[in-house]
Image (cartoon, helix red, strand yellow):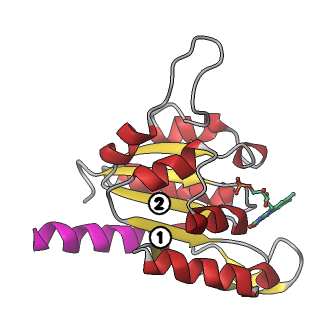
Amino acid sequence: MLEGKHILTGVTGGIAAYKTAAVIRLLVTKGAEVKVIMTEHAKKFVTPLTFATLSGNPVLTAFYNVENGDWNSHVDLGLWADLFLVAPATANTIAKMSAGIADNLLLTSYLSARCPVFVAPSMDMHMLAHHATTANIETLKAYGAMILEPTSGDLASGLSGKGRMMEPEDIVREITEFLKKKTSAS
Ligand SMILES: Cc1cc2nc3c(=O)[nH]c(=O)nc-3n(C[C@H](O)[C@H](O)[C@H](O)COP(=O)(O)O)c2cc1C
């Protein structure tokens, strides 16, 4: 169903990063080729080995390899992708994306991407409800990003409210339907 589709997945440092493993597994099962970029904070939550194994591709985390000078071209990644998914998207990364900050590989790839962008916010309910975050999400929407609405329920903070990352099956369904419509329209 997603055969031949290139999906670039950005993983940031939120507790829902473990759920992105299921997203990648489902995308690969549907035939997509998946490459994963992780922020430095994301690596504290899930190891790159998990995503490399599930995607079948090396995980990208840095601009270049300090050992040998090999560098990861964000421009090439941006051109490679048919769809860029950021899941989970922390308040921090959402703010940086909305401001055009480019201080890690995920952010430079976002700015370089020529494809549709999906963002799955995930955070504490009060962080999500803060004016700064709601304004940043609105900015991303205005720039054309599609927001995968967080759901309500128990949060890692122990509180209950809106801020849970959309469930993996629902994320993959949204992406699949979007790409299907895009293909039939072209
Ligand atoms: C245990 C723990 C859980 C966290 N969970 C979240 C989260 O779900 N959402 C969020 O926006 N920030 C969360 N944070 C804060 C981010 O890790 C922090 O803002 C970090 O700078 C994000 O960096 P990144 O966006 O570059 O990955 C958490 C921090 C800790 C220590």
Count residues near mark 1 (Cα–Cα under 10 Å), then give few for <14, some for 14-19, many for 20+.
many
137 relative to 175 in the view: left or right: right
Mark 2: which amino acid?
Leu
Above or below, 143 relative to 45: below
User: Position of 9 compared to 161: left or right?
Assistant: left
Q: What secondary structure is the stretch in magenta mostly built from?
A: helix
Q: Which residues are magenta?
A: 171-186
Q: Do the residues bearing badges 1 and 2 touch, measured as CB atoms within 8 Å?
A: yes
Q: In terms of depth relative to the viewer, which is nearer, 102 or 2? A: 102
**In front of the other: 28 or 111:** 111
In the image, residue 157 lies in the stretch drawn in magenta: no
Alpha-carbon distance for marks 1 and 2?
Answer: 9 Å
Q: Quadrant of the N terminus?
A: bottom left
The residue under the point 75% across, 48% down is 41
Which residue is labeled 1 in the image? Answer: 171
Residue reaching furthest right?
Answer: 158
To which quarter of the image does residue 100 belong? bottom right
Question: Who comes first in sequence, dot 1 or dot 2?
Answer: 2
Q: Can you say whether 115 is above or below 67 in the image?
A: below
Vertical relation: 171 (above or below) 36:
below
Q: Is residue 74 visible?
A: yes
Quadrant, the C terminus: bottom left
Assign a secondary structure to mark 1: helix
Give the label, 1 or 2, closer to the camera.
2
- Residue on which the image places disc 2: 85
> Regarding mark 2 in the picture, which secondary structure is present there?
strand
Q: Residue at x 71, y 69 (%)?
A: 91
Neighbor class of circle 2 (other Cα within 10 Å; few <14, some 14-19, many 20+) is many
Q: Quadrant of residue 138 in the image? A: bottom right
Observer-nearest of 132 and 119 = 132
